[in-house]
Amino acid sequence: MIEKVKLLLDDLNSKKYQTLRKPCAVIPETFEERIEKDVPLLFENDDFGFNRGIAVKLRGGVGNVTPNYYSVLSKGFDLIIKNIETAMKNESDNKKIEYGKTTICKLALCIKKCDEYCEYAKNTGNIKLYNALKNIPRKPAKNLYEALVFIKLCVYFLRWHSFDHLGFGRFDKMLYPFYLQEKNSGVSDEDILSLIEEFFISINRDVDLYAGVQMGDNGQSIVFGGVDEYGNNDFNELSNICLDASYELSIIEPKINLRVNKNTPLEIYEKATLLTKQGLGFPQYCNDDVIINGLTKLGYDKKDAVNYSVAACWEFLIPGLSAEILNTGKFNFPLVVNNAVHKYLLIEDSFDDFLQRVKNEIICECDRIRKEKEGLRINDCHLLSVFIDGCAENLKDMWCGGAKYKNFGCHGIGIANATDALAAIKHRVYEEKSISKQRLIDALNANFNGYEHERNLLLSSPKMGNNDDYADSLSLEIMQTFSDNMNNKPTPWGGVWRAGTGSAHEYYYSAIHCPATSDGRKAYDYFSSSFSPSLGVKTEGILSVIKSFTKYDLSNIINGGPLTIEVHNSTLRNEEGIKKMAALVKYFIDNGGHQLQLNSVNKETLKDAQIHPEKYPNLIVRVWGWSGYFIELDKLYQDHVISRLEYTL
């Protein structure tokens, strides 16, 4: 790491840069007001700029979008404006003409602010940024540095337009032509590494963007590797450099997703495991063999599915083609099973009949969720639509027919808790008959107060995560019913619904609306995070967990949602541990897993950080689909991370 990067990193970790923003008593309401109010701000040694100059935090409107940055930075704003003007001349629809005018006005405002930054850079002696801004964003980026500045300024403007979750997409593939250009010009990989590190540091200055609990959850996910349209691995030299940059910096942005498949070499897993060892909570692994197949089942063209990326957390989308809301539905599996218990347990004589009642409840809940979203509408997004293929030049908004894909996604929350509840009912109520039906309902109503014996029986019943078909087969039943009645159902926008296994923060928010459940969980206690064993469940180890959670054909439930595993940080202390973990990740992929994220943690350290936060200013953990600084999290999220089971190899 060169000295300049060290200085930038020290400044970032000190968070002194936050004090340089000017206070703002009233938050500007519109994009135009925000751009007008904000002032250019360059930090020491900062060659990227486009930092928030006013100290406001925004909770935005539309998120989980991955723009086509390459299309914009390879054209420049001047050509885009010219193309819009040409389209307007050939258009008779006044609404479309007005749409074009508004889009041009917003782009012109962006150019004006860039001119201000250009002049400011010149006056402060930042000649590198000044020279770049004499060309971009009006004209295409001429080199890797200009391409990175172009991306940074686009994110800056889109954020002020209230688009807070903006992924970078397939970063290595997008910028690879610029990398080759640099190499052909004699630039060394070491210099390119330093430039990438400076860019990564620059985007971390927005980790305090949110006013709420999700400090660090800015959607700055980045994807490396993956197959091309011919099935060849697309992991390139720039992919490797970016992994090195993230490893050296050990900061929370960008959140790395690594696309892999059965043919991915083991050494790539080993290199990626070094990031896990750093305690960053990433990379998150995405299995091309499962995901591409799953996306094509949902109607994506194969050539588009091959180019998939990851949204803010884990939802799969196509960069530049997606106007999709992939976390609009929330399916609370434990609550649905619990409702079936209270409505039907007493009247069903066999478990099979009761299970059918549960399936019927799942079907009804799918119908309810879809109906609830029938009237969903989003206002025009003129600026963001510039980054979605086919929108600006056709005078169409991305949310109103401009984008190719307009799908909705539904998270499946607490699958393991629901499975464990069904397994306990089958084992203790119907087969063993150690708990009567009425006794179980009474215990649930009492939140197990006075029913400790019954609760212990439920807690000791078969659980998902032990490679036990008794429980795992029930998870297959409920996931199949969910996917059958959610996938490919029409949305009001002309797209389809997608089923997934993610939970996001719903492991808390959905859990606090769910009374005591038949797995022995007490009322309002946490669910497991995404696609993971229930909290507190003793399993046979990581291998048994992987086997349990890869039995279902996960291409049928592809909206995203990783198997999340916490490993004790001592596991990755030496080379042997690194190799074992890499081999285990490869086993997960080869066995049909679709998504995996690993959190290297130490519970004692986390507990100490709660008591002495000043000792751990840069301690990082994976919260759900994002990583954050532990001491900045609300205590409820800290407690959830601590309560997850640690594994060793």
Image: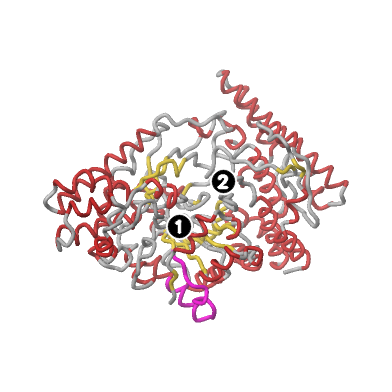
Give me the C-alpha separation between circle 2 and circle 1.
31 Å
> In the image, 236: left or right of 483?
right
Question: Where is residue 274 shown, x and y percent of the image?
Answer: 56, 71
Query: Which portion, as a residue range, is magenta?
Result: 565-584
Work out whether residue 237 can be spotted: no
* Amino acid type, mark 2: His
* Amino acid type, mark 1: Tyr
Per the rendering, the mark at residue 644 is: none
Query: Looking at the figure, which quarter contains the C terminus?
Result: bottom left
Residue at the image position 47 percent from the left and 53 percent from the top: 314
Which residue is label 1 attached to?
230
Question: Where is residue 349 shown, x and y percent of the image?
Answer: 11, 51
Foreground residue among 368 and 179: 368
Question: Where is residue 143 shown, x and y percent of the image?
Answer: 72, 53
Which residue is label 2 attached to?
165
Q: Is residue 557 above or below residue 233?
A: above
Foreground residue among 532 and 76: 532
Residue at the image position 46 percent from the left and 67 percent from the top: 566
> In the image, 324: left or right of 211?
left
Quarter location, residue 475? bottom left
